[in-house]
Amino acid sequence: MHALFLASALLVGCLLAVQASVNLQLNKAVGTPYGASTLQLSVATALLALLAVAVGAIGAVRLVPGVPFWHLLGGLASPLYITSGILLFPRLGALAAAGLFVTGQMFASLGLDLFGLLGIARKPLSVGIALGALAVLAGITVIIRGQRPAQTPAPAGPAPGGAPGTSGRGGTATVTAPAATAPAAVRRTGGLGQTGWILLGIVAGAVLPVQGAVNAALRKDIHQPVTTAMISFIVATITIAVVLIVLLATRRTPRPQLGGLRTMPWWGWLGGACAAAYVTATFTLIPTIGAATTVALTVTGQQVASAVIDNYGLLRLPRRPLTAPRLTGLALLIVGSVLVQLT
């Protein structure tokens, strides 16, 4: 049974990478990342509400009025993380974006542990933690510096004049496709530059441990993990909906085009299910196998799944082959994450 719990933690980590990838299809369908995030969070909220009703945990919401206000704010992290994934995955690739998220997660976790913040038990700095942090930092540096342009399938048939990057025998050819492979609505969101996108990824990852600590406090208040997750997603959905309304009012984002949902692949809706499964599973696994083991395994699953998605161009993402530097960076990230969480 213990092995099943460990495998579950690894699997839900993989779901984080899948979630960010399939959300790009939702973004492409509605034409704005903020509209896509609103839809995805609404789906997750509905699924968790149905689950809370099914397991008889919905009654815990009556305890919410007596909860400290800040215990309800864990959901604020989800819109930032989800929207950042939609923006970063087509620009940096699944592995690099997930690597930035993991880097933010690790250093935020260290801050919470070393300073005993938000009710987290204080943890002394050890040699293993220091080495792990350095390995994570080295890993994401190697991955970012080793970035190559993405590759997308070339149009079928030979190009006029036998241009490079085509196949003369009907085989599959690839052409380089840098940032222009991102959906038009994503490209219109602004030009932060490479440094800005990197910082966004680190910050988006850093809010996840903070969200976990806040949600853990809420769980102690209402005693129901599923209801805790539902409340967190309600806050998240309201937050991103308000952001969307403000951006629409100031004409900073296109109006969502719901008609595009008809042509979206069915798996474009799975982002909400992945998010709900991740939150629910982590609440369930932490008391059973421990927080450190859960985080180490979910981070590992996230990195491995991101590497596979990148290498094979799965879920309609541009293909970014796993070069030796990227494999080295991936290994450093995984080793560093395990050292930080388990020492």
Image (tube, rainbow, N blue to C red):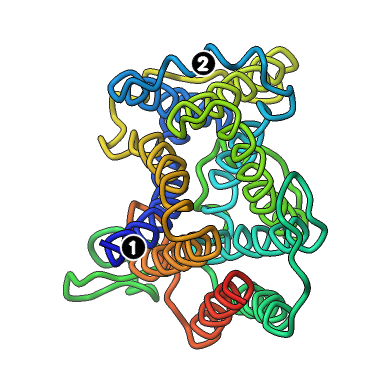
Q: Look at 46% across and 26% down and name the residue there.
A: 227
Extreme right residue here?
115
Taking the image as drawn, is residue 7 in sight?
yes
Would you name the residue on which mark 2 appears?
Answer: 61
Residue 176 in sight in this render? no
Say left or right for 96 vs 285.
Answer: right
Indicate the amino acid at tag 1. Answer: Ala
Quarter of the image that includes the C terminus: bottom right
Across and down, in percent, residue 248 comes to 66, 16
Left or right: 136 as drawn, with respect to 38: right
- Whole-percent x, y for residue 165 in the image: 37, 73
Query: Looking at this view, is 16 or 28 the one in front?
Result: 16
Q: Residue at x 53, y 53 (%)?
A: 89
Helix, strand or loop under label 2: helix
Quadrant of the image containing the N terminus: bottom left
Q: Residues within 10 Å of mark 2 (few under 14, many from 20)?
A: some
Query: Could you say which is closer to the camera, residue 161 or residue 108?
Result: 108
Q: Going from the N terminus, do you reach mark 1 or mark 2 first? A: 2
Rendered residue at 73%/60% (across/down): 113
Measured along the vertical axis of the image, is residue 248 above or below residue 118?
above
> Comparing marks 1 and 2, which lies closer to the viewer?
2
Q: Please, what secondary structure does the residue beneath circle 1 have?
A: loop
Q: Quadrant of residue 29?
A: top left
Residue 121, horizontal then vertical, whole percent: 72, 56
Instruction: From the image, tell me which residue sits under label 1.
Output: 154
Q: Residue at x 73, y 45 (%)?
A: 119
Residue 6 at what x, y percent from top left? 35, 64
Q: Is residue 98 above or below residue 268?
A: below
Q: CA distance from mark 1 to mark 2?
A: 53 Å
